[in-house]
């Protein structure tokens, strides 16, 4: 059965940010964990208060806010202003000060005390609290104990606000800034600016990539030992997540060198130091002798060994061991299916043998949030299934890795009812072209226009063409970043290019764009790169996508990821607009068929559903 393609949605909103200034009337909602808040803002020149939503840590009634963001229409709550940047100004009027203090910003001050304070000190009330708090004792009802509490709470509030502003100034999200301040206290900015890589070790949710971007913004030396050590540990962590129980030294050095774009010789002394400190276990394993193994629970006695990846078991390496079962555990995670231990090419492979549909139950939650609409989750399930089928390789030790290089696979613990419903509701469905499962690529946010496959992966595929994507509106739909000449020079050297002397005229210049508007030919520091090499240079500069414009050393771009295939935020927007998962797939993969997996392959096109 053939259907019509989905109607073309309206063009995306790329209008500039709107500036608002006003006074907080009331705080209607606040999440202490991620600092998301909803406030009513009284804006000059507007008869009705404006609903403002976004990360607004510590905002209180009576504060004057200066904000940038965009108005949007919520399907349930109506018009609201989504803030992307803001700062607060303490109120200056008597009424505003009283309302601010009565809001609970200081624990020792309630509505009555606020009224007495303002009646006594007038417009100078906040200045008195800030600079001469001992004068508060002049107000009836404020004794020594209460005075000490008010002073302490006010100082804590102001200090927290200053640190959060400073951390956000480093480019960190408000959520991460809050976590960093909570962990380090007054040392937060010092740690973040002196050794960002320590954050990746201490702060949950802040990984190596975020720390590395922060270090680049701070113009830290890319060869600093802290960066090299963090890169080595990151590669080991990724390998452990993929099921490997060790990584050969040469491979570790090569992969880290590629990740950091640094020479291998610079990594060797750092690896030796990590070994001496016991943070990495380095051991020769002659063929036939003991190696790192992980057995399923109940399949032998296992014991942990220091900080080594995996666990150890006594015995000699066999060519092939297999442990079938409904579940097994690896590095604290439980996976469906059995485990296969295979010695091949000087490496030990820990391979999860699992049914395709069960595998997807551990993939979908890692690739798309549970809160996305069900039709978007279904579209992602079909794409993830198709991606897996397309990558099946009987000649390799395994079909797919468990990291973002393939598809993130986290096992049983992340499964949710909504994700499971999406997988079960599309059971066996794959996208096909000319009788084969397609290369079903996907990314986070297209920035309003998907890319053709040849723009990124060199090979042109008829179903992966540039497509308008107006429903892609995510947190990275528009972004601004700065690129330093030092970072640019390091990025060029990592590609084997020699930058010329830096000067204002050597800032990035886009000479040619691809069909989707992405960078195709770029000149930087006197060096010109083209095609996939230009794409690689953009990535090395730390930019979210190649859909970018440069104004001197400032980069303004749209989207996140390579831009080919399904846009996850675009799928969300289409689903919210009423499109079904088949129409979503038809928009991103025109000319394909929605086929059923059969024992001998996939269903014939005549029996499949055409996506266009």
Image (cartoon, helix red, strand yellow):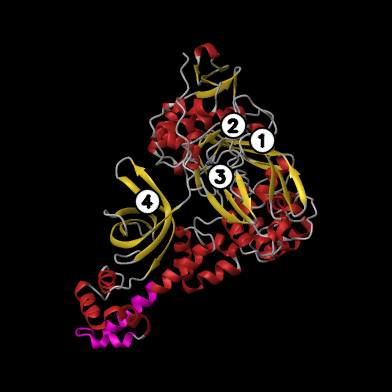
Give me the residue at 50% from left, 12% from top: 607
At which x and y percent is residue 164? 45, 66
Q: CA distance from mark 4 to mark 3?
A: 23 Å
Q: Earlier in the sequence, mark 1 or mark 3?
A: 1
Q: Are marks 2 and 1 in contact (CB under 8 Å)?
A: yes
> Which residue does the numbered mark 4 point to in the structure image?
81
> Which residue does the numbered mark 3 point to in the structure image?
560
Q: Is residue 496 above or below residue 376?
A: below
Q: Earlier in the sequence, mark 1 or mark 4?
A: 4
Instruction: Judge from the rendering whether residue 199 lies leftward or rightward of residue 106; answer left or right.
Output: right
Q: Is residue 331 visible?
A: yes
Give me the residue at 26% from left, 87% from top: 137
Q: Are marks 1 and 4 in contact (CB under 8 Å)?
A: no
Q: Is residue 194 above or below residue 390?
A: below
Give me the residue at 36% from left, 71% from top: 90
Crowding around mark 1 (Cα neighbors within 10 Å: few <14, some 14 to 19, many 20+) is many
What's the magenta region?
133-157
């Amino acid at each position: 059965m053939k259907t019509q393609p989905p109607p073309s949605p309206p063009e995306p909103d790329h209008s500039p940010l709107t500036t608002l200034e006003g006074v907080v009337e009331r705080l209607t909602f606040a999440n202490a964990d991620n600092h998301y808040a909803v406030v009513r803002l009284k804006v000059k020149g507007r008869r009705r208060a404006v609903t403002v939503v976004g990360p607004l840590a510590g905002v209180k009634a009576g504060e004057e806010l200066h904000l940038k963001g965009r108005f949007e229409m919520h399907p349930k709550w109506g018009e609201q202003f989504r803030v992307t940047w803001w700062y607060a100004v303490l109120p200056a009027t008597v009424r505003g000060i009283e309302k601010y203090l009565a809001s609970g910003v200081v624990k020792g001050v309630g509505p009555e005390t606020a009224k007495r304070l303002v009646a006594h000190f007038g417009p100078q009330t906040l200045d008195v609290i800030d600079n001469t708090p001992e004068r508060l004792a002049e107000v009836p009802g404020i004794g020594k104990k209460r005075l000490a509490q008010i002073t302490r709470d006010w100082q804590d509030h102001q200090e927290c606000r200053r640190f959060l502003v400073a951390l956000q100034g480093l480019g960190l999200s408000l959520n991460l800034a809050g976590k960093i301040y909570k962990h380090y206290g007054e040392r937060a900015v010092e740690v973040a600016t002196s050794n960002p890589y320590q954050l990746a070790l201490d702060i949950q949710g802040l990984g190596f990539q975020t720390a590395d971007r922060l270090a680049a913004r701070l113009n830290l030396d890319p060869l600093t030992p802290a960066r090299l050590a963090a890169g080595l540990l990151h590669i080991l962590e990724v390998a452990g997540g993929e099921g490997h129980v060790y990584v050969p030294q040469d491979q570790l050095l090569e992969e880290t060198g590629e990740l950091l774009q640094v020479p291998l010789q610079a990594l060797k002394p750092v690896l030796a130091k990590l070994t001496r400190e016991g943070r990495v276990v380095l051991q020769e394993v002659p063929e036939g002798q003991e190696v790192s193994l992980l057995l399923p629970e109940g399949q032998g006695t296992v014991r942990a060994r220091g900080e080594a990846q995996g666990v150890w078991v006594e015995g000699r390496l066999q060519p092939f061991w297999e442990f079938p079962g409904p579940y097994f555990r690896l590095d604290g995670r439980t996976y469906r299916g059995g485990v296969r231990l295979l010695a091949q090419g000087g490496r030990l492979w820990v391979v999860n043998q699992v049914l395709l549909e069960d595998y997807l139950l551990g993939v979908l939650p890692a690739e798309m949030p549970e809160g996305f609409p069900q039709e978007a989750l279904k579209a992602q399930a079909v794409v993830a299934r198709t991606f897996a089928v397309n990558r099946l390789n009987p000649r390799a030790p395994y079909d797919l890795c468990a990291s973002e290089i393939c598809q993130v696979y986290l096992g049983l613990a992340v499964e949710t009812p909504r994700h499971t419903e999406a997988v079960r509701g599309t059971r066996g469905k794959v996208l096909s072209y000319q009788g084969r499962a397609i290369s079903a690529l996907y990314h986070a946010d297209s920035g309003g226009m998907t890319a053709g496959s040849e723009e990124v992966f060199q090979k042109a595929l008829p179903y992966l063409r540039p497509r308008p994507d107006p429903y892609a509106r995510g947190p990275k739909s528009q972004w601004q970043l700065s690129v330093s000449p030092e970072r640019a020079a390091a990025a060029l050297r990592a590609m084997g290019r020699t930058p010329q002397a830096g000067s204002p005229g050597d800032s990035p210049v886009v000479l040619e764009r691809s069909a989707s508007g992405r960078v195709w030919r770029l000149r930087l520091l006197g060096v010109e790169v083209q095609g996939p090499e230009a794409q690689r240079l953009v990535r090395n500069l730390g930019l979210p996508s190649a859909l970018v414009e440069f104004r001197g050393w400032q980069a303004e771009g749209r989207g996140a990821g390579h831009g080919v295939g399904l846009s996850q935020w675009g799928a969300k927007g289409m689903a919210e607009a009423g499109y079904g998962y088949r129409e979503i797939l038809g928009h991103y993969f025109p000319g394909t068929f929605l086929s059923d997996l059969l024992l001998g392959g996939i269903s014939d096109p005549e029996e499949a559903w055409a996506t266009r």
